[in-house]
Amino acid sequence: MTKQPEELALMAESGRLLASVFGLLDRTPLAGLTTLEVDAMVETFIVEDLKARPASKGQYDYGFVLNSSVNHVVCHGVPSEADVLKDGDIVNFDITLEKNGFIADSSKTYLIGEVNPAAKRLVKTTYEAMWKGIKAVRPGARLGDIGWAIERHAKKNGYSVVREYCGHGIGREMHEDPQVLHYGKPGTGLVLREGMVFTIEPMINQGRRYVRTEDDGWTVVTKDGALSAQFEHTVAVTSDGVSVLTLRTEEMVRGAAA
């Protein structure tokens, strides 16, 4: 379950490369693109520019490089030529990357054009909630501390936390132990140890927490049709706290956390 220093170094390299994929998306005018076009662009960048493998493609027979979850889609949205990103949308791109046998996983919710204040507030709060969870990570802390920090922030702002999906351990496999819930009670759950690596990826709903899966077997949406947002980082427990392996350039510049 824990990673050795040489493994952590390889995971950090995968994380650095994955962060650069989001740099590409940050530089790309997304309005007017289909989510399938974004998928193709990201695949080309990962394979040709980064000489890495898009780890999601082929995992569980999934045929694409990323998940593209627009507006009321909670997670696992499937790229499509019918999904054209338009002014006012919010969209989460969830991307994995493998390099040297180790996988990193991260996601970011983008605002497309002029987004209404309520949607902006949801996205901002979700990002803050992820960082509340990250800041709870340190040796001797418990998984319940992470979930509690996330849920408390979401509920304080009037939102709900999706319970059907969670963070997870990661390394040579995309999904390893432990499961990292985004709700919980402080002082409960697995004790964190140096060398553990896992994702923190809260899905926060504008309305109620309940979700359903569409007929394609992948796309998860809010039952009430309200908006949902998500952010995700891969983190490692260090001797004195936490290292965010997928930290993006803009987060380094501004000091990252909300």
Image (cartoon, rainbow, N blue to C red):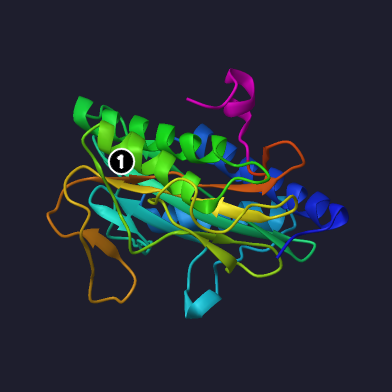
The answer, for residue 169, to whether it is visible in the render is yes
Secondary structure under tag 1 reads strand
Residue drawn at the location 54% of the way across and 38% of the way down:
136
Tell me where the magenta segment starts and ends, as one range: 247-258
Residue 164 percent coordinates (x, y): 33, 64
Residue drawn at the location 22% of the way across and 45% of the way down:
227
Question: Is 250 one of the magenta-colored residues?
Answer: yes
Q: Quadrant of residue 124?
A: top left
The answer, for residue 105, to whether it is visible in the render is no
Residue 235 percent coordinates (x, y): 63, 47
Residue drawn at the location 25% of the way across and 31% of the way down:
157
Quarter of the image with the N terminus in it: bottom right
Horizontal relation, residue 178 to residue 126: left or right: right
Q: Vertically, is 154 above or below 190?
A: above
Q: Vertically, is 192 above or below 63?
A: above
The residue indicated by pointer 1 is 90
Residue type marked 1? Ile
